[in-house]
Image: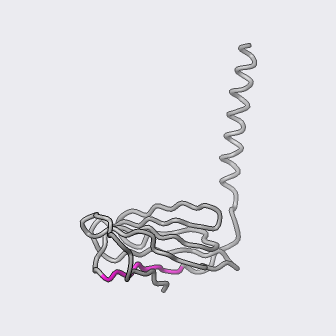
Amino acid sequence: MCQDHLFTRRLVAVALLALVLATCRDAGPQVTNPVSLHVLSPNGPEGAALVRLEGGIDRVEATATGWLLTDVIADTTWVMVARDTPGELSFRIHVRAGGQLRDAQLIEVSGPDDTMRSQTAGYHVEIR
């Protein structure tokens, strides 16, 4: 019984190691030049935003002080950008070679007081 338990633990460890090594390999083709995205606000400086990107995004980079969190689900990249002090919310993306950014949609925005805005009418994401 003890030998079976030891074998199972080793098998799980090897499977986890294989999974980690698989994530380290090259995930896709080379990327194009970075593209900047800016959240345009009718209310001036903002604190944070959640943006949904559709398309072949390779990676996302911060352009200002603060936080940048990303999550990729299939062909959708979720980006949460927050500033230490209110200001323009922006970030850079790298699109895979041969890919394209099909859509960039603002989902939520937080004002300079870190309170969620009740609506996002008048906001949009500008690609530069």
Q: Nearer the viewer, residue 76 or 63?
A: 76
Taking the spot 39% from the left edge, 80% from the top edge, the residue there is 123
Give the magenta range.
35-42
Judge whether residue 36 is colored magenta: yes
| Numbered marks: total | 0
Judge whether 11 appears above or below 63 on screen. Answer: above
Q: How is the image coloured?
A: one colour
Query: Could you say where residue 87 lies in the image, as x and y percent from the top left?
Result: 30, 75
Q: Residue furthest bottom?
A: 128
Judge whether residue 14 is colored magenta: no
Query: Could you say where residue 58 lies in the image, as x and y percent from the top left?
Result: 61, 69
Taking the spot 70% from the left edge, 71% from the top edge, the residue there is 29
Q: Quadrant of the N terminus?
A: top right
Magenta residues, dominant SS class: strand
Left or right for 114, reference 27:
left
Q: Residue furthest top?
A: 1
Q: Nearer the viewer, residue 124 or 60?
A: 124
Judge whether 2 appears above or below 23 on screen. Answer: above
Query: Could you say where residue 105 lies in the image, as x and y percent from the top left?
Result: 50, 75
Q: Quadrant of residue 32?
A: bottom right
Q: Quadrant of residue 54?
A: bottom right
Q: Residue furthest left?
A: 113
Q: Quadrant of residue 7?
A: top right
Q: Nearer the viewer, residue 72 or 24?
A: 72
Taking the spot 65% from the left edge, 63% from the top edge, the residue there is 74
Taking the spot 56% from the left edge, 66% from the top edge, the residue there is 77
Query: Could you say where residue 11 lies in the image, as x and y percent from the top left?
Result: 73, 31
